[in-house]
Amino acid sequence: MRNHPLDGVEREQLSITDVRVLPLSYVDPNRDLWRCGGYQVWKTDGAITQIFTDQGLVGIGEGSPYENPAEIKIYTEQVIRPLLIGMNPFDVEYLANRGNDSRHNRAPWAGIDTACWDLIGKAKGKPVYELLATDGKPSRQIQIYASAGVQHEWYDNGADFLVEEALRYQEQGYDAFKFRPGTDWQHAGMTLARYVPILERLRLAVGPDFRLMHEGLGMALGSLEAIITDFAPVLEELGFYWFEEAFGGTSLEHIDLFLRLKQALPTVKLSGGERFLERFEAQPWLDRRVLDIIQT
């Protein structure tokens, strides 16, 4: 068993010669891609990082679609590029483990990180997932699910839209559907008393074997405590598969709340950690066995 993905992996002699970023952005003509809570998304971004080497191999990565691609390009090419010229991408841990104080600062380095790993895989002639599997042979298949539920508007027949959307995915062959809690509850007058019948109707429509996953509610119920006492029993009764980022994030200050939530959801998995900036942030959650699914 390897403690690190590169333990026992022979280094190749590669030298970085250039680093470039291709910024991408799509603006929806109707300025209405999707919505959730109190915000509406009208464009989507990307920043493709390319690392060139003296052996002709090019590593491709991406930092984050949630940060400004123009800023990622400027920082990568003006600040990071001079630091990487002449370096070996096999030193990925040394080269890319920086900017961990915020998502904004981490985004450019994350593009470098993934591009270096792409180069390592290409240099060794192996897919990166094989290199990352330190404790056994990795599965070559990943079950996918429909991650959506970002168009139902509680102020405009949202309940019908949510149920119909789930049924469409079911007809397409999906066996699992994750959805968000809809548009701003306060604005639409949504309450838990109104919401529970919608979830019951959804479960009845898709049947008992179709997996349903719910995104976090944050402060929609007025307090985080209400998620444990009032909402968790609903998910348990309706046989939800997982509850993601229950309190609107996976903050260490909420770890005791997560432990109580876990007790309230004996058959529903708890998912979280998508906002962790580095793998070490997952350690206390692993140590205390809080999360069933870590998204990092």
Image (spheres, rainbow, N blue to C red):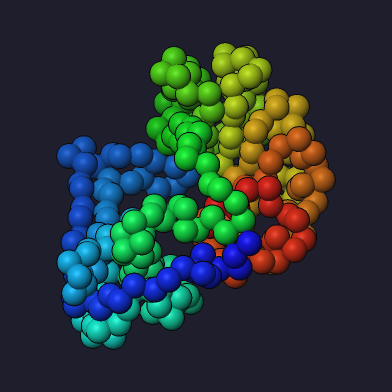
State whether residue 202 is above or below residue 135. Answer: above
> In the image, is 294 to the left or to the right of 177?
right
Name the residue located 40 percent from the left edge and 48 percent from the top edge: 39
Question: What residue is drawn where x is 57% and y is 14%?
Answer: 205
Report the front residue among 260 and 277: 277
Q: Quadrant of the N terminus?
A: bottom right
Q: x%, y% of residue 22?
A: 18, 61
Between 94 and 246, the residue placed more toward the observer is 94
Give the vertical position of 251 relative to 96 (above or below). Answer: above
Residue located at (45% from left, 76% from top): 93
The answer to which quarter of the image holds residue 96 is bottom left
Q: Position of residue 124 (x, y in %)?
A: 36, 61
Image coords of residue 231 (percent x, y) = 71, 38
Please say whether residue 186 is visible from this viewpoint.
no
Residue 173 image offset from top left, x and y in percent: 45, 19
- Residue at position x 70%, y 25% in the image: 238
In which quadrant of the rendered view does residue 227 lie?
A: top right
Front residue (pair 21, 69):
21
